[in-house]
Image (cartoon, helix red, strand yellow):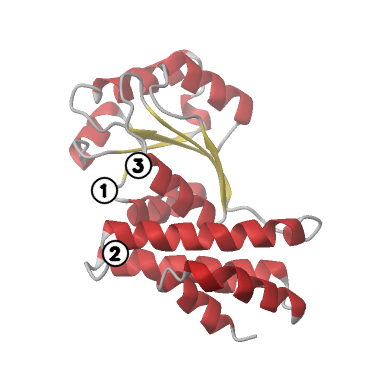
């Protein structure tokens, strides 16, 4: 099969054809890891670039991420047993007092698409539960979301709780959400800030390598 077709399918958010194209690739003997990296992930990378340059908007990026996720679900049974390297593990959640999840969910989907193992711990998560998740799951990255100015202080509370538990140097913390800024991320001692889901993927890749 032509991998370009699968790439374009994700870029176009062609939910109707992604399953068939993945199945076609498998029946043609294309390695599942190649379909994942050179097809689905490559497509989502292009979508991320288009979003950052203003050529695509949030609903379109969300549709592309959903298309890619559908393709990944078809691939999953074929990936087991094959050597597939994950890009890293990310624990992600929305901080205490905040029940917004659309942005978090999109970031989680984009990270999964980029090859990360994502553990979503949900919304309105107390600092102690986030610390517990970091302790148990031992992720390379912790992604924290705050969508309200009133819940932004919970980002700092969580980072402070990680310090108290002796875990701060064991995990890279990235933060985001509508009211959050790079300055605020620096102020509270986060390792990185992203303003959108595409930027979060780029940031996560950089943090894992640093």
Label 2 or label 1, whichever lies nearer to me, is 2
When the figure is inspected, residue 22 is found, relative to residue 88, above or below; the finding is: below
Residue at image coords 28%, 57%: 58
Residue at image coords 45%, 54%: 110
Residue 135 x/y as whole percent: 58, 23
- The secondary structure type at the circle numbered 3 is helix
* Label 2 vs 1, first from the N-terminus: 2
Residue 102 tag number: 3
Label 2 or label 3, whichever lies nearer to me, is 3
Residue position for label 2: 51
* Label 2 vs 3, first from the N-terminus: 2
Which of these two is toward me, 153 or 210? 153
Residue 194 x/y as whole percent: 30, 47
**Distance from label 2 to label 3 (Cα)?**
17 Å
When the figure is inspected, residue 86 is found, relative to residue 46, above or below; the finding is: above
When the figure is inspected, residue 67 is found, relative to residue 179, above or below; the finding is: below
Residue at image coords 51%, 23%: 167
Residue 37 x/y as whole percent: 59, 68
């Amino acid at each position: 099969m032509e991998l370009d077709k699968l790439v374009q399918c994700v870029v176009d958010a062609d939910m109707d054809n992604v399953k068939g194209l993945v199945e076609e690739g498998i029946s043609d003997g294309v390695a599942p890891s190649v379909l994942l990296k050179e097809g689905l992930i490559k497509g989502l990378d292009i979508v991320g670039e288009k979003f950052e340059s203003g050529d695509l908007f949030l609903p379109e990026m969300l549709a592309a991420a959903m298309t890619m996720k559908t393709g990944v679900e078809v691939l999953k049974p074929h990936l087991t047993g094959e050597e597939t390297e994950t890009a890293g593990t990310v624990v992600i959640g929305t901080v205490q007092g905040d029940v917004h999840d659309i942005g978090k969910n999109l970031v989680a989907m984009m990270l999964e698409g980029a090859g990360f193992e994502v553990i979503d711990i949900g919304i309105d998560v107390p600092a102690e539960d986030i610390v517990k998740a970091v302790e148990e799951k031992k992720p390379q990255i912790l992604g924290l979301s705050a969508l309200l100015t009133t819940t932004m202080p919970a980002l700092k509370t969580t980072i402070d709780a990680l310090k108290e538990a002796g875990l701060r140097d064991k995990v890279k913390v990235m933060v985001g959400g509508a009211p959050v800024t790079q300055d605020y991320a620096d102020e509270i001692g986060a390792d990185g800030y992203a303003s959108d889901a595409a930027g979060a993927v780029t940031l996560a890749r950089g943090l894992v390598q640093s």
